[in-house]
Image (cartoon, rainbow, N blue to C red):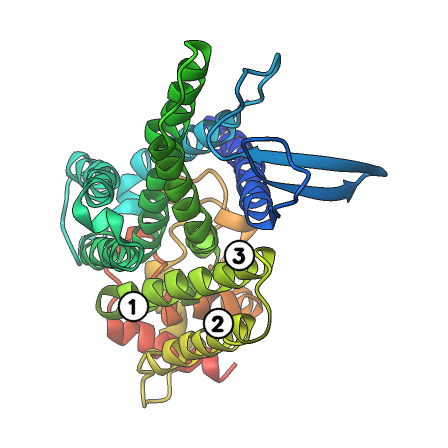
Amino acid sequence: MTIPWVEWASLMIRWLHLAAGIAWIGTSFYFIWLDLSLRSRRSMVKGVLGESWSVHGGGFYHVQKYAVAPEEMPAELHWFKYEAYFTWLSGFALLVVVYYFGATSYLIDPARADLAPSEAIGASLGFVIGSWLIYEALCRSPIGRSTPMLALSVLMLILTSAFLLTQIFSDRAAFLHAGALIGTIMSANVFVVIIPNQKKVVAELIAGRTPDPALGAQAKQRSLHNNYLTLPVLLLMVSAHYPMLFSGGVDWGWLIIAFIVVAGGVIRHFFNTHHAGGRGVALAWQWPAAILLALGLIFFIASRGPALSENKISDTRALKIMTTHCAGCHAAQPANTAFSTAPGGVVLDNLDAVRRHSKQVMAQSVTSQAMPLGNLTQMTEAERGELGQWLKGQ
C-alpha cells in the first residue's frame, strides 16, 4: 500500500487554511462594516461613540462602540485573533509543504535564477519577513501619519517586491509569494499591533486608569489596512489556478499584480463608503474605475500573448514536444518521481489526449510558462510557439 503523505498533508492544511481564512475575512469585513455603520444618537450612554442596529437570524442586535473604552470592564469580553493566527500558520505550512518541499518543481525557475533549494527557500523567507519589517517601519515613521502617503508607500513596497519576485522565482511562485507577503503584513498587524493595543486598553481599565486613545487609533489604522488588502490577497492566492494571470512573466508580471492590488482596493473603497453612508458622487466612480481596470488587465494580458510559429507544425513535431516536455509527469506511469499518478489525472502521451486537453495545454504551457514545472526540461520559447500554433489548428 502506497500513501501519498505529502499530498494528504497539502489537502488537510489547505482545508484548514480556507476555513480559517473565511472566518478571519468574515469577521474583518463585519467589524469594518460595523465601525462605518455607527450612528450618533441623543439618547446614547456617556462615552459611547456610536451605535448600530441590525437584524439577522430572526433577532435584533444593538451594538455600541465606546470612544475609548467603557468605565468598567464587562464580565465577558470576546476577542477575535485566532482566526488571523491560524490563517497565517496554515498558509505558511502550505507554503512549506508545496513550495519548500517541492522547491525544484514549484519554486525555482533555473532560467531566471539557478538557485539551490536552500537558497530559494532563504530568498522566500527573506521576502516574506523583510517586506513586513519595511511595512512596519513605514507605519511607525512620519509617513504613517499621512494616509495618502502611507497608502502610496505600501503600494510601492508591494510592487517593488512583486518585481523582484518575478525576476527570481517561477511565475506561479512569484504571484503566490506576493500574496504571502501581503498576508503576513495583515496577520502581523493583528499579532503585533491590534491585539497588544487592545490588551493595553484592558489592563488600563482594570488598573482604574483611562486608556490612551492613540492605542485605539493605531489599531483601527492597521485594521483598515487589512480591509483594503483583503481582496487583492484573495485573488493572488488563487492565481495558481489561472495561469493567464501570471503570463506576464519576468517582464510584466509585477504590473499585473499592480492591476490586482489597485482594483481590489477600489472595490473595497466602494463598500466602505457605502457602509459609512456615502451616496451620490461619493459612490459614482468606484465600479466604473474597477471595471476599466479589469478590462485593462484582460486586454493587456491578451496583448502580451505568445508569438506563435508562422510555420505549419506537423503532428509528429507536436507529439515530440509533448513527449519531451510534458509526458514525464503527465503519463499513466510518470517518470518524474515526484508524482505517483499523472497530475490532475491528465495524461498527455498521445495526440488524442493532447487534443482533449488542448485548452489546458495552451493555458499552462503556451499562454503562460506554468508548465513544465520549474521548466526542468528547458522548454524554449520557440517550442512553446510551435506547440501553440499546432494547438490553434486543432
| Residue mark closest to the camera, 3 vs 2 | 3
Q: Quick check: marks 3 and 2 in contact, CB under 8 Å?
A: no
Residue at left 59%, top 55%? 275
Q: Which of marks 3 and 2 is nearer the N terminus?
A: 3
Q: Quadrant of the N terminus?
A: top right
- Amino acid type for the residue under numbered disc 3: Asn
Give the CA distance from mark 3 to mark 2. 15 Å
Q: Which quadrant of the view contains residue 76?
A: top right
SS class, disc 2 = helix
Q: Circle 3: is it few (<14), some (14-19), or many (20+) Cα within 10 Å?
A: many
Q: Quick check: marks 1 and 3 in contact, CB under 8 Å?
A: no
Res 155 seen here: yes
- Amino acid type for the residue under numbered disc 2: Ala
| Residue mark closest to the camera, 1 vs 3 | 3
Instruction: Report the residue marked by disc 2.
Output: 290
Q: In the displayed structure, does residue 51 sit left or right of residue 217?
A: right
In the rendered image, the vertical position of residue 77 relative to residue 319, given as above or below: above
Residue at left 24%, top 51%? 169
Query: Between residues 345 and 50, which one lies in front from this camera angle?
Result: 50
Q: In the displayed structure, does residue 186 sit left or right of residue 53?
A: left
The outermost residue toward the top is: 207
Residue 331 in picture, x, y percent from top left: 47, 51
Q: Quick check: marks 2 and 1 in contact, CB under 8 Å?
A: no
Q: Which quadrant of the view contains residue 335?
A: top left
Instruction: Report the residue marked by disc 3.
Output: 272
SS class, disc 3 = helix
Q: Which quadrant of the view contains residue 223?
A: top left
Instruction: Report the residue marked by disc 1.
Output: 255
In the rendered image, the vertical position of residue 345 relative to residue 282, given as above or below: above
Residue at left 25%, top 76%? 382
Give the CA distance from mark 2 to mark 1. 16 Å
